[in-house]
Image (cartoon, grey):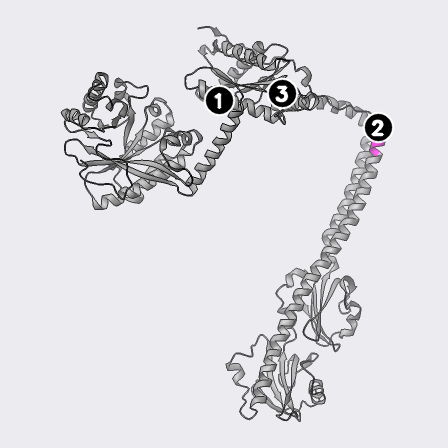
Amino acid sequence: MVVEKSRKSPGRFKIRRCCFRLQPPATCIAWIPTGTLLLVLGIWLAALTRIQTEGREARTAVASATSQVASSFAAHIDKTVHDADVIVGWVKYEYERSPSTFNIDTLKDKALVSADTALQVTIVGPSGEVLQTTTPDAQPVDLSDRPHFIAHKTNANLGLYISLPVLGRISHHWSLQFTRRLNNPDGSFAGVVVVSEDPTFLTTGFYNLDALGVGGMLAVLSDSGNLLSRLAAGELASPVEAPAPEYRDMLDVKGGVFADPIDRMRRFVTYRHSARYPVAVLVGMSEDDALAGYWHARNLYLLLAGGLTVVLLTAAAFITVTMARLAAARAKMQHLAETDALTGLPNRYLLTESLRQCIEREKPFGQLALVFVDLDNFKRINDALGHQTGDELLQNVARRLARVAGAESFLARVGGDEFVLVIKGARALAAAQSLASSIIDAFEIAFGLRGNSYVMRASIGIAVYDADTEAEYDLLRRADLAMYAAKEEGKPANLSRYRVYAPDLSTRAMRDIERQQELQYAIQNNEFFLEYQPIVSLTTGETQGLEALVRWRHPEKGVIPPVDFVPFAERTGFIVPIGELILEAACAQFSEWLESEPGPLYLSVNVSAVQLIHGDLVTVVRRCLDQHGIDPRRLKLEITETTLLDGSAAVERSLKTLRLLGVRVVLDDFGTGYSSLSQLTSLTVDGVKIDRSFTRGIPDDRAALAMVENVISLARDLGLTLVIEGVEGEQQVNWLRRFGDIEVQGFYFGRPVAPTTIRVGRAA
């Protein structure tokens, strides 16, 4: 075998980039002073424009906010007045219905008077005397001079009357009095019903006080010119504060700025009149609070504009020298941005930008091809020998690819172990195929690394620009798809392969994406179910164990057997969550069987190598055993020969831990992989299952008979359990009886069936 020795150089070499070099824009020093002045002017224009714009936006936002709060507050006042009017109306109705039997004390019993709202309810007679009141031990008083009494006495058609805040002669509290006229049956004046409310409740009971900020103001005005209630900056107004006419300039305003007549604070004010009652509300938001953010931003804009002006004007004197330095630094940075640090080759960015410019400029149909090269099993070498050795290998690979491609080719490293070569010319496809063959031949020479030699295999994909290619990413994607198709062909046989892109690869990729989505939906919708096949003793015919076999009930395709989805699930990693679902369901069902059949029954479940390497199988098994109360010795996990022969440290650790738990590990489909009989002595398993391909030849195939006899003998000598699969005929059964008590599995003893129809006991 020919070995190419590793060079001690860092692996950097020059690759001609052809027409793909990205050109920097030209600069002109003469424009620097003019540009600086224009920039300063633009900064100030932008700052002033922004200040004006944000000022308008801030004022509009505050006006909108006060309008929304005013609407809410007006609705709140409507409800509050309505609640008081309901009490007034109810008392009026009950009193007029039977004045002689009416007792105002029943109001409290019926919870019509609350300490949070009504201070008292009073019935005033036709002469102004107090007939009844909810205030205990009230002294006789004459209310005939009250404005509400006079108004109702002189106007029979007056509805609800709301007084200005007055000091109650009975309650001795400041209150608003909601009153209605009482009539005798003949319509004559019978007095007044009065419900006294705390005026502060109109404002302090509003739920949205925080929306107005610290300096916010709420006020309630009556149409008769009275200030009923006011709350400003957290302070309640005195009942003898400025009257409502002082607010006349604020009527019908929406977001206007006014100085409050009481505390002189400037506020954004919005006015709303009640739709049902003779009251209106004013909502104000402090100008200082509302515009604090805008003023801060305005000062910041001015400060920034001034600072930038000073900086720009100062820097203008030195800009010529600075531009020269910047140009040099830019060239260096561009080189770093376009170059792979490890190999010195162009990177993915430069490749995609170069392809984009070439496609936009030339539309090179049939004259541009990509050769996508990916190393097989590089990760294994990188993990085993270390990243430093892996980096050295990548440098050697890049150097060899450069020699094969020639000085006129464009070579780029686009990923960890991925390289792309660009081929241009009239016969780009033929040249790309020839180059791919040359690369494959070159990789037959082993790479020398630190005294050892390693033969690397490469998977190569080729894509040619055609009329269906929309952008550079389409070309890269097609070359990548072709590379993966080549990898599927060559990697299992440890051979380098190349593949030219064909439309069916995109179709297959889309189909794989759809299958991934279907598997994801199947996991989410619990579309997987289990059937069970008995494992029986050939001597007694009794069921010794049950193997759980997964099926997929697709909503459109029906029941799908495992052979049609398990390999794809293993390749995409979906087998990990599917395997957890299978193990959980199988253990749950097995636990139910153990309650009815406590005999020496065991459960056998297939486990994928992906679960052992990438999943947390040990934790899942331990959880299922504990949750369902299953003896670990009753659980067998079936693995394939390739899982053990992989030699992965993660697999060995997982199997060792599982066996320490008491779970038994069985080598499934024995004889179909790469192992021999002698290898059983070194494998960490508890038993084997002879594949059905050997059982099928019993009793006519001599090779199959010899294989079965040897495995049975070796398994017994090593103390391994043994199950023979694929027993489907009586001739097979009769021949196998010669070996005494062995366990068999096949259609002769039972097909895989649903758990509800499985027979736990004698199978045949």
> Pointer 2: residues within 10 angstroms few (<14), some, or many (20+)?
few
| Residue labelled with disc 2 | 31
**Residue at 75% from the left image edge and 76% from the top image edge:** 225
Quadrant of the snapshot with the N terminus: top left
| Residue labelled with disc 1 | 485
> Looking at the picture, which amino acid does disc 2 mark?
Trp
Instruction: Inspect the magenta stretch and tell me whether residue 286 lies in it.
Output: no
Q: In this view, does 297 lie to the left or right of 32?
A: left
Q: Residue 505 in the image: x percent, y percent?
A: 51, 25
Q: Residue 176 in the image: x percent, y percent?
A: 66, 79
Compared with 513, 264 (above or below) is below
Q: Magenta residues?
A: 30-36
Closest to the observer: 288 or 757? 757
Q: In which quarter of the image is residue 403?
A: top right
What is the C-alpha distance between the residues marked 1 and 2?
Answer: 55 Å
Q: Residue 543 in the image: x percent, y percent?
A: 20, 36
Q: Residue 226 in the image: x percent, y percent?
A: 73, 76
| Residue labelled with disc 3 | 339
Comparing labels 1 and 3, the label whose residue is closer to the camera:
1
Closest to the observer: 439 or 507? 507
What is the C-alpha distance between the residues marked 3 and 2?
Answer: 32 Å
- Per the image, label 1 sits on a secondary structure element best described as helix
Q: Are marks 3 and 2 in contact (CB under 8 Å)?
A: no
Compared with 589, 109 (above or below) is below
Of the numbered discs 1 and 3, the one sitting upstream in the chain is 3
Compared with 187, 711 (above or below) is above
Seen as rendered, the residue at the extreme top is 2
> Looking at the picture, which amino acid does disc 1 mark?
Ala
